[in-house]
């Protein structure tokens, strides 16, 4: 089992209010949840109207497939209303010592 954590820094250049940003962000979150079956949430900059940091978490048995899914999320996040300004990926599994096997 491998857990993938993807953190995206986003910029909303056309947003003129928190309402504009939240509308674009809700759309992005709904698409990611439905297409990729991931957990996703805004984790920073909730009070800024042109910036956001979003965390995405996914679990899979195959790290290559997990990496591919997270890469597709990054590509799909960028669009006419959203710019991706930063990307961080972390993977956790038994070999890293982050997960304990059930006894």
Image (cartoon, helix red, strand yellow):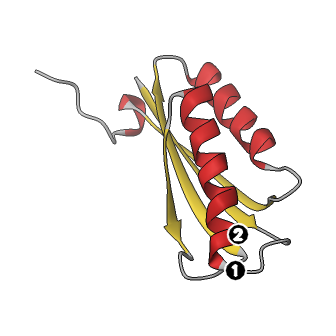
Q: Residue furthest right?
A: 80
> Helix or strand or loop: what does disc 1 sit on?
loop
Find numbered disc 2 in the image and state the secondary structure of the residue it sits on: helix
Of all residues, the one furthest to the left in this rendering is: 103
**Quarter of the rendering occupied by the N terminus:** top left
What residue is disc 2 on? 20
Q: CA distance from mark 2 to mark 1?
A: 5 Å
Residue 24 found in image quarter: bottom right
Residue 67 place in picture, x, y as percent: 65, 30
Q: Is residue 79 visible?
A: yes
Residue 15 position (above or below residue 64): below
* 77 up-or-down from 45: above or below: above
- In screen coordinates, is 16 left or right of 89? right
Please state if 4 lies on the left or on the right of 22 as rendered: left
Q: What residue is at 34 percent from the left and 39 percent from the top?
A: 97
Task: Judge by depth and name the residue closer to the eye, 4 or 81.
Answer: 81
The percent position of residue 44, horizontal first and vertical second, equals 52, 72
Count of numbered marks = 2
Compared with 28, 61 (above or below) is: above
- Local crowd at mark 2 within 10 Å, few (<14), some, or many (≥20)? some
Give the image quarter of residue 75. Answer: top right
Question: Can you give x and y, in whole percent of width and height, for residue 92 in the image?
Answer: 44, 39
Which residue carries the number 1 mark?
Answer: 17
Q: Is residue 44 above or below residue 2?
A: below
């Amino acid at each position: 089992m491998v857990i993938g954590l993807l953190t995206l820094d986003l910029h909303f250049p056309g947003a003129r209010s928190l309402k504009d940003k939240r509308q674009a962000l809700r759309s992005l979150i709904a698409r990611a949840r439905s297409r990729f079956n991931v957990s996703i949430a805004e984790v920073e900059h909730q009070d800024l109207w042109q910036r956001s940091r979003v965390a995405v978490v996914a679990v899979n048995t195959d790290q290559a497939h997990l990496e591919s899914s997270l890469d597709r999320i990054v590509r799909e996040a960028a669009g006419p209303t959203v710019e991706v300004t930063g990307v961080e990926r972390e993977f956790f599994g038994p070999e890293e010592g982050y997960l304990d096997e059930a006894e």
